[in-house]
Structure formats: structure tokens, C-alpha cells
């Protein structure tokens, strides 16, 4: 499981749970920051289009259609992702998204 010194071997399950929770927490923070950044980028593109600025080849409808397609793909593969993850990782992920 974990390569620990002999003095810490009895605590291996507890250490594994703590590591899973901290990993989930960090992933939750990263996911929340990524979602906020994406939303702000979409808002900037929409506002830029409203006042006459635009990026070549990027429109609000293109971004929204790509986001919906990616979200549908991620949601369809979510059960396979979460089937092998411990409850502590999921709790850490939820706390990271909530408090991030």
C-alpha cells in the first residue's frame, strides 16, 4: 500500500485516508478555479462582442456549444471515474469545490 517506515506502519490506513482527502481537496480547488476562469472568459467574450470587439474565430455561440459538448462527455463518463475513488477523496473534492 504505502512505503512507510516501520514506526508508521500501524497508521498506514489513516495516512492513506488523509492523503486521499487532501488530494480531493486540491483537485476541488483546481476544478473550482477552472470553472470560474471559464465563466469569466465566456462573459468577457460576450461583453466584447456586445461592444464590438471580437477574437477571430471565437464567438459566444461557439464557446457555449463546445462547453455543452464537453460537459455532456464528462457527465457520461463520470460514473466510471468515481467508481474507483474512495469516499474520502469525494468528500475532499466536495469541500474543495465548496470552500475554494
Image (spheres, rainbow, N blue to C red):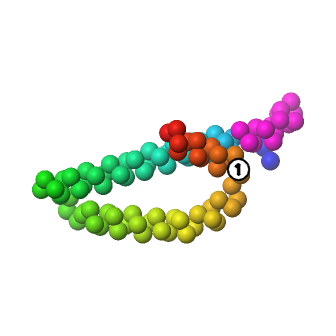
Residue 50: percent from left, percent from top: 16, 56
Residue 79: percent from left, percent from top: 63, 65
Q: How many marks?
A: 1
Q: Is residue 77 visible?
A: yes
Label 1 SS: helix
Q: Is residue 23 visible?
A: no
Q: Is residue 31 above or below residue 14?
A: below
Q: Is residue 7 above or below residue 21?
A: above
Question: On the rendered structure, is 41 left or right of 33?
Answer: left
Q: Please tell me how crowded label 1 is: few (under 14), some (14-19), or many (20+) other residues with Cα within 10 Å.
A: some
Q: Is residue 53 above or below residue 33?
A: below
Q: Is residue 11 magenta?
A: yes
Q: Which residue in the rendered view is the most extreme toward the left?
A: 52
Residue shown at 52% from the left, 38% from the top: 99
Give the quarter of the image for residue 14.
top right
Q: Which residue in the rendered view is the most extreme toward the top?
A: 7
Residue shown at 50% from the left, 69% from the top: 73
Residue 12: percent from left, percent from top: 81, 39
Residue shown at 19% from the left, 53% from the top: 48
Predominant secondary structure in magenta?
Answer: helix
**Which residue has dot 1 on it?**
87
Residue shown at 13% from the left, 53% from the top: 51
Question: On the rendered structure, is 46 left or right of 12?
Answer: left
Residue 36: percent from left, percent from top: 40, 47
Q: Is residue 7 magenta?
A: yes
Question: On the rendered structure, is 76 left or right of 43?
Answer: right
Highlighted range, magenta: 4-18
Amino acid at each position: 500500500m504505502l512505503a512507510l517506515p516501520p514506526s508508521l506502519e500501524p497508521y498506514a490506513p489513516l495516512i492513506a485516508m488523509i492523503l486521499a482527502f487532501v488530494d480531493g481537496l486540491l483537485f476541488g480547488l483546481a476544478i473550482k478555479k477552472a470553472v470560474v476562469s471559464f465563466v469569466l472568459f465566456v462573459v468577457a467574450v460576450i461583453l466584447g462582442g456586445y461592444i464590438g470587439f471580437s477574437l477571430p474565430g471565437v464567438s459566444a455561440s461557439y464557446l457555449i456549444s463546445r462547453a455543452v459538448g464537453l460537459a455532456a462527455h464528462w457527465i457520461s463518463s463520470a460514473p466510471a471515474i468515481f467508481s474507483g475513488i474512495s469516499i474520502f477523496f469525494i468528500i475532499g473534492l466536495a469541500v474543495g469545490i465548496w470552500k475554494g
